[in-house]
Amino acid sequence: MKIGYPCINWGLTSRSNATFRLKSYTPEKFRDTVKINLHGLQDILAFNASHDLNFFRISSDLIPFASHPICEVDWIKEFKTELTTIGDYIRKHDFRISMHPSQFVLITAQSEKIVENSVRDLDWHCRLLDAFNLDLSAKVQIHVGAAYGDKSRALEKFIHNYHSLPSHIKQRLVIENDDRIFDLKDCLYLHAKIGIPIIFDNLHHACLHNDEPLIEAITAASKTWSTQDGILMADYSSQEPNARVGKHAQSIDEQAFTEYLQATRNLNFDVMLEIKDKEPSALKAYALMQKVRGKA
DNA sequence: GCCGGTCAAGGTCTT
DNA sequence: AAGACCTTGACCGGC
């Protein structure tokens, strides 16, 4: 079991999500920013290595405007040295890597334009992971998408559009159960149709489910991951007290996470902590994981 | 320096 | 009708 956190390390000055406004885009600004972000990513990965945080979600701001028509820089070619170095480092440390494109990526969209934009966005995420030379256990996760008031129609749209995706996207794309529209059961339906793996999000499941107990739900999700996909990825969060239902906690609830680890102790999977404070909670989670599960 | 309006893209739910 | 929220807060102009 690997423990990780998404995108940002608050304790380090290094960062990998610097961006800028579209109107201030110039090729030079783009190159400068990408350079900062790639070096920042190396620093963050070094921190992770020294703290046994072996799962990391790379920010979609790593390459700002990568899927926007304004960006004509061949960044994979220009930054080949940096990308190779980072990829080698990731493989050397056996890190698990994920990415999570934004809410604007909608495979279920009725507008072809939105689908095209979505595919372009997925394309660069997957090409980045390819440029790192990572195996197919490095994943790009999205929500199923918009329903437009007709879930079953949206699911069929997802299946239809999925079949049209290029293979370098299909082999990295995974879906996550969400807290409002498409629950685990819907994701399992898609998996049955197209074989796509499912990331299990416990907080979303708590918000929207069909009465499946946690262990049953997470086991079902884990079975959607083939050997080449690697073991299940799970997004973990707990509810922020006294806030809107579904809002992620500011810091980890250690008792709740311990209970989660105990309930799932017979299953091997990697945990992404979607907790607002980032690495402090991930470090606590790692300590709890060792306590509950031992070194494995 | 710091504050606040705004930021590529869409949809959904709340107020 | 407008704002909040979601992957992930952060940029940037004005003071």
Image: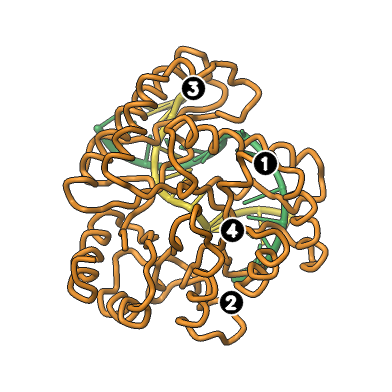
Chain colours: A orange, B green, C yellow
**Residue beneath label 3, please?**
A76
**Residue beneath label 4, please?**
A175
User: Against A255, is A268 above or below?
Assistant: above
Residue at the (38%, 51%) spot, across then down: A6
C-beta proximity under 8 Å, tags 1 and 4: no
User: Which quadrant is home to the C terminus of chain A?
Assistant: bottom left
Instruction: Identify residue type, mark 2.
Output: Leu
Nearer to us: label 3 or label 2: 3
Label 2 Cα neighbours within 10 Å, binned few <14 / some 14-19 / many ≥20: some
Asked whether the residues under marks 2 and 1 belong to the same chain, the reply is: yes
Instruction: Identify residue type, mark 3.
Output: Ile
When asked about the image quadrant of residue A252, the answer is bottom left
Q: CA distance from mark 3 to mark 2?
A: 40 Å
Q: Earlier in the sequence, mark 2 or mark 1?
A: 1
Nearer to us: label 1 or label 4: 4
Instruction: Identify residue type, mark 1.
Output: Ser
Q: Position of residue A214 (x, y in %)?
A: 47, 81
Q: Earlier in the sequence, mark 1 or mark 4?
A: 1
User: Against A36, is A4 above or below?
Assistant: below
**Residue beneath label 1, please?**
A118
Q: CA distance from mark 3 to mark 1?
A: 20 Å
When asked about the image quadrant of residue A209, the answer is bottom right
Q: Position of residue A206 (x, y in %)?
A: 50, 78
Left or right for A60, reference A104: left
Report helix, strand or loop for mark 3.
Answer: helix
Left or right for A272, reference A227: left
Q: Which mark is residue A208?
A: 2
C-beta proximity under 8 Å, tags 3 and 1: no
Residue at the (33%, 63%) spot, across then down: A250
Host chain of mark 3: A
Name the residue furthest top. Answer: A28
